[in-house]
Image (spheres, rainbow, N blue to C red):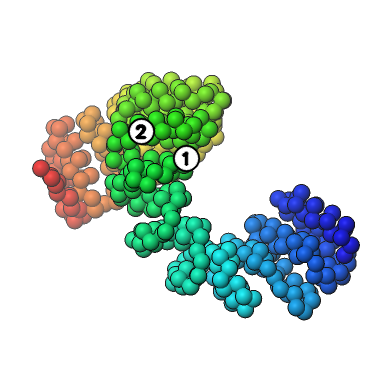
């Protein structure tokens, strides 16, 4: 192939590297235009085929990279050797396909081609084995590597954490000669994921104070769950100050949203509200609004949550199911029944969202608390069969007990028994409803039915 033609083709490939149809057209041109694309072994031809191989390996159908590689093996001249880029792209394709068998075949080819000590190829193999959960093979590759860089160590550590091997990952991390922020973040994330929040915080402190490594925005996002699960408000304030000083807060909306959530869960709704107000209007997204609404709901501030939801609508931000669930919880616990019913209706008719069992449960709980038992019963009957469960009816039965409504309670108990007959607490509740209403014969009848159905009431347990 003429050098000018090859250069033009390479320019087109790089220009349309993210366009699958364009790359396929160029691939077809290479196949049918000239046989020299296979007979030539010039560097630019290598680069062209590697570019196409890279596109396929990172694309939606990585299998195409494997097909291309096999085709090239048959067509390219004798003595042609693939380079480290070719094998790296092919290894990535095997990893994305979750096909360790293909990966092992490529591994053998790399050894035959002399890449047994090539750090980039071996790191790609390590990543492939970890991604395919072949941890024994990944250990062998790691141990046999004569040279390892930070990417090698981080790929191995994060891969082990991904599959729950936290202790092993910590051992590898401790043996790492030069730890960077990616290494620390990966291990901190591992402790957070398994619920070891204090260990995560201690590790974060060691990274910042002892090692002097500045956390990235990803590190902050990783440590926030540990902070709000332990309720350490001071830690939240320190991260807030660091975000301001480092400038992270000004460019990463995810950190600001996490701050709103963390302050709320650490008990400082005032600080959460201030952080939310500090976010510019054009930067606020769905998560920002949902976080502050959830915070207000968590602190029993129903009116503030309701007002914030209306402000969100005025800002033309479309809510999702989580946002609406937070608003319903706020209305339920704040006694804003009419507003809650209005928001539920908007969810279905205005936003076209399908309520799930939590939305129905929150609405029924809200109506039950307000004593609107017949309306709550009607809603419960309208719940789709693929969504409904016994918890909804038990919630309504509890409301009947609270308000002493035996008539509705009896109908609700029938629905409960259609779904589950063996929980003794339901019988006891209905029996008490009848007894409080003076219907002692019916109360005794429920107790007998409980014995006949062999229903057992779980005894209470106190930790005091």
Q: Position of residue 122 (x, y in %)?
A: 55, 67
Q: Position of residue 25 (x, y in %)?
A: 81, 57
Q: Earlier in the sequence, mark 1 or mark 2?
A: 1
Name the quadrant containing residue 395: top left
Residue found 53% across the figure and 32% down from its top: 251
**As drawn, 412 above or below 47:** above
Q: Is residue 343 left or right of residue 237?
A: right
Residue that label 1 marks: 217
Asked whether the beta carbons under mark 1 and mark 2 sit within 8 Å of each other, the answer is no
Nearest to the observer: residue 321 or residue 447? 321
**As drawn, 243 above or below 43:** above
Residue found 23% across the figure and 29% down from its top: 403
Residue 254 seen by the camera:
yes
Residue found 51% across the figure and 35% down from its top: 252
Query: What's the CA distance linking mark 1 and mark 2?
Result: 14 Å
Nearest to the observer: residue 90 or residue 316? 90
Residue found 14% across the figure and 36% down from its top: 435
Q: Position of residue 126 (x, y in %)?
A: 51, 66
Question: SS class of the residue under badge 1?
Answer: helix
Name the quadrant containing residue 446: top left
Residue that label 2 marks: 238
Q: Is residue 434 left or right of residue 108?
A: left
**Total marks drawn?**
2
């Amino acid at each position: 192939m003429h050098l000018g033609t090859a250069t033009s083709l390479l320019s087109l490939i790089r220009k349309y590297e993210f366009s699958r149809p364009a790359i396929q057209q160029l691939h077809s041109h290479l196949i049918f235009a000239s046989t020299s694309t296979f007979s030539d072994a010039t560097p630019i031809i290598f680069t062209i085929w590697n570019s196409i191989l890279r596109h396929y390996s990172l694309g939606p159908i990585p299998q195409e990279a494997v097909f291309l590689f096999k085709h090239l093996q048959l067509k390219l001249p004798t003595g042609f050797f693939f380079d480290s880029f070719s094998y790296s792209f092919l290894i990535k394709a095997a990893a994305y396909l979750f096909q360790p068998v293909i990966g092992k075949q490529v591994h053998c080819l790399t050894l035959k081609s002399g890449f047994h000590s090539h750090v980039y190829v071996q790191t790609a193999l390590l990543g492939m084995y970890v991604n395919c959960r072949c941890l024994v093979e990944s250990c062998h590759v790691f141990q046999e590597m004569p040279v390892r860089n930070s990417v090698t160590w981080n790929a191995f550590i994060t891969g082990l954490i991904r599959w729950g091997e936290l202790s092993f990952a910590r051992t590898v991390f401790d043996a790492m000669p030069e730890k960077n922020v990616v290494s620390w973040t990966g291990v901190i994330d591992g402790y957070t994921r398994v619920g070891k929040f204090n260990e995560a915080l201690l590790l974060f402190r060691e990274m910042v104070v002892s090692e002097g490594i500045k956390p990235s925005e990803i590190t902050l996002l990783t440590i926030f769950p540990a902070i709000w699960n332990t309720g350490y408000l001071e830690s939240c304030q320190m991260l807030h100050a660091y975000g301001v000083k480092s400038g992270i807060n000004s460019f990463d909306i995810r950190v600001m949203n996490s701050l709103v959530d963390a302050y709320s869960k650490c008990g400082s709704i005032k600080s959460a509200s201030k952080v939310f107000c500090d976010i510019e209007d054009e930067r606020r997204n769905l998560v920002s609004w949902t976080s502050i609404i959830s915070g207000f709901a968590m602190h029993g501030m129903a009116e503030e949550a309701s007002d914030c939801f209306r402000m969100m609508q005025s800002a033309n931000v479309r809510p999702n199911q989580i946002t609406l669930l937070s608003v319903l919880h706020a209305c339920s616990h704040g006694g804003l029944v009419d507003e809650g019913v209005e928001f539920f209706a908007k969810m279905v008719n205005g936003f076209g969202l399908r309520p799930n069992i939590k939305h129905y449960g929150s609405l029924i709980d809200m109506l039950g608390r307000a004593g609107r038992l017949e309306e709550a019963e009607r809603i419960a009957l309208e719940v789709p069969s693929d969504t409904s469960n016994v918890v909804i009816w038990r919630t309504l039965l509890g409301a009947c007990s609270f308000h002493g409504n035996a008539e509705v309670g009896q109908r609700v108990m029938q629905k409960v028994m259609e779904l589950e007959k063996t929980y003794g607490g339901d019988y006891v509740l209905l029996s008490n409803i009848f007894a409080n209403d003076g219907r002692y014969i019916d109360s005794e009848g429920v107790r007998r039915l409980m014995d006949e159905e062999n229903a057992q009431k779980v005894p209470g347990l106190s930790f005091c």
